[in-house]
Image (cartoon, rainbow, N blue to C red):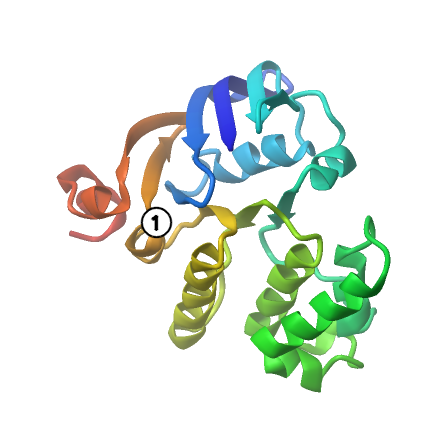
Amino acid sequence: MLDIHGLSTHYGRIQALHGIDLTIGEGELVALVGANGAGKTTLLRCLSGVQPATAGRIVLDGEDITRLPPHARVERGLCQVPEGRQVFGPMSVEDNLRLGAYRRRGRSVTEDLERMYTRFPVLKERRRQPAGTLSGGQQQMLALSRALMARPRLLLLDEPSMGLAPLLVAEIIDSIAALKDRGTTVFLVEQNAHAALRIADRGYVLETGAVVLSDTGAALLDNARVKSAYLGG
């Protein structure tokens, strides 16, 4: 579904990504792990079109989308849940969800809204509340549901467990695994390497803007270098 070839980007004179090569097959859950500052969020920003690529290509379903604006990528089924959730705090939970479907019209939007409420009942209970009044875990559920309202074919998740209590982390990770089981292709960027690799079909390790390892999720969990650097082993 997604092929990344030689992708590089710069912040001014500083090169943040160094010739990234990465593939994601349809129906896969692929994890990207690495330390803070490794370039994980920058890579997602390049994929969603927020950060321009300075070299390389991003190919989605055979179409080169490297120069497409963000909204055009959303129309092609590429949606991102940003780091820190980024909900619209003063707006209601339901209005946040409807914003996720802003490129869509018709009855199917209402049907999807009910699906989100079935998946996360607490959002239905609080649908009239300002999103900023939700707990961190509830905001993460809202951010995830908002992206799903766009009916993504490829979902980009940036640090969904950040700042959450362990029980909530488990709930969010299980929700992501369930999305994959329902057929959504997922690219999961996560500092919690154990949680991410446990549910991933395949994984990549990013260090200082370059991919240094790639393998199945299970193999990376058992890799001595990954254990030492990211799993506390």
Tell me the residue at 55%/72% (across/down): 137
Query: From the viewer's perspective, is 75 left or right of 120?
Result: right
- Asked which secondary structure carries label 1, the reply is loop
User: Residue placed farthest to the bottom in the image?
Assistant: 125
Please state which amino acid type lies under the numbered disc 1: Ala
**Residue 215 versus residue 144 in the image, above or below:** above
Residue at the disc numbered 1:
200
* Nearer to us in this view, 202 or 114: 114
Q: Quadrant of residue 14?
A: top right
Tell me the residue at 29%/55% (across/down): 198
Q: Quadrant of residue 156?
A: top right
Instruction: Provide residue 88's location: percent of width, then percent of height.
Output: 77, 62
For residue 209, say whether it is visible: no
**Residue 94 versus residue 103 in the image, above or below:** below
Instruction: Provide residue 64's location: percent of width, then percent of height.
Output: 63, 20
**Residue 168 versus residue 121 in the image, above or below:** above
Tell me the residue at 64%/63% (across/down): 145
Instruction: Provide residue 44's location: percent of width, then percent of height.
Output: 56, 37
Disc 1 crowd rating (10 Å Cα; few below 14, some 14-19, many 20+) is many
* Nearer to us in this view, 61 or 54: 61
Query: From the viewer's perspective, is 53 left or right of 43?
Result: right
